Image (tube, rainbow, N blue to C red):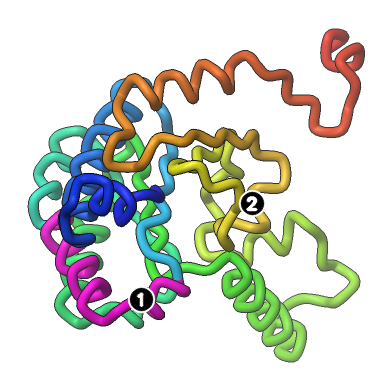
Amino acid sequence: MDGNGRWAKKNSMKRVLGHRKGAEAVRDAVKTCRKLGIRYLTLYAFSVENWLRPKEEVKALTALLKNYLEEELNEMMDNDIRLTAIGNIDALAGGVKTILCEAIDKTSRNKGMCLNLALSYGGRDEIVDGVKKIVKDIAGGTIKENNISKDMFSKYLYFPEMPDPDLLIRTSGEYRLSNFLIWQLAYTELYFTDVLWPDFSKEHLLAAIADYQSRERRFGMTSEQLSKD
């Protein structure tokens, strides 16, 4: 969800106001995905690299997260949305972490859609943490080195129950993954748009999904092979 700062600058506002406007776009995106029956939606809300931003902006971002969780909890319950989070959650300020964990717990039985927040998250960190867990289990005799496979490794990631994403949407004209779900995006369809996140509307989301639906996903096979199936 990129472009909040540039949106604020474009509209002669402080960066924090761009993030607030971006939070409104989050609400619209979540509601639209829920209505469409999308089962998993992961939002890259705060990367591990974002901690390097000015302290005032980091403080504002965590405050926005806290407000979002407080204001949207009833909405998530009413719409059968389960909240989850991936990343170094322990790095979050105590109050934010507490509210996040409470929201995760209260929505844990919801089954309509999973809203997954990537917070203090880094794709490379996730892979390294997974390797550390595997090394620990090998040392403890839980698994054997020869049994390690791609499927097994996936179970050591932050959210192993979540299927690999079908579609990645990157806003604001950036053409990179920025350390997001590096392992999981191996065969994900990528969609890039120049629209800044605060301006990303329901119509933009539907256009991205329509573009995805027009693509042929071959997973290394040929079109002829897929037609036979």
Q: Amino acid at mark 1?
A: Arg
Q: Secondary structure at mark 1?
A: loop
Q: What segment carries the magenta color?
A: 48-69
Label 1 or label 2, whichever lies nearer to me, is 1
Q: Which residue is mark 2?
A: 184
Q: Amino acid at mark 2?
A: Gln
Find residue 42 and report its horizontal and vertical position in percent. 43, 47
Find residue 177 and report its horizontal and vertical position in percent. 59, 53
Please identify the quarter of the rendering in which residue 183 is found.
bottom right
- Identified at 89% across, 27% down, the residue is 221
- Identified at 82% across, 67% down, the residue is 148
- Nearer to the camera, 84 or 152: 84
Q: Which mark is residue 53?
A: 1
Find residue 103 and report its horizontal and vertical position in percent. 20, 58
Please identify the quarter of the rendering in which residue 127 is found.
bottom right
Label 1: few (<14), some (14–19) or many (≥20) C-alpha neighbours in 10 Å: few
In primary-sequence order, the first of circles 1 and 2 is 1
- In the figure, is residue 48 to the left or right of 147? left
- In the figure, is residue 195 to the left or right of 163? left
Alpha carbon distance from label 1 to label 2: 27 Å
Find residue 61 and report its horizontal and vertical position in percent. 23, 66
| Residue 159 appears in the rendering | yes
| Residue 37 appears in the rendering | no
Q: Is residue 63 above or below residue 151?
A: below
- Identified at 36% across, 41% down, the residue is 196
- In the figure, is residue 202 to the left or right of 24? right
Q: Is residue 32 above or below residue 155?
A: above
Q: Which mark is residue 213?
A: none
Query: CB under 8 Å between callouts 1 and 2?
Result: no
Q: Secondary structure at mark 2?
A: loop
- Nearer to the camera, 209 or 110: 209
Can residue 165 be found in the magenta stretch? Answer: no
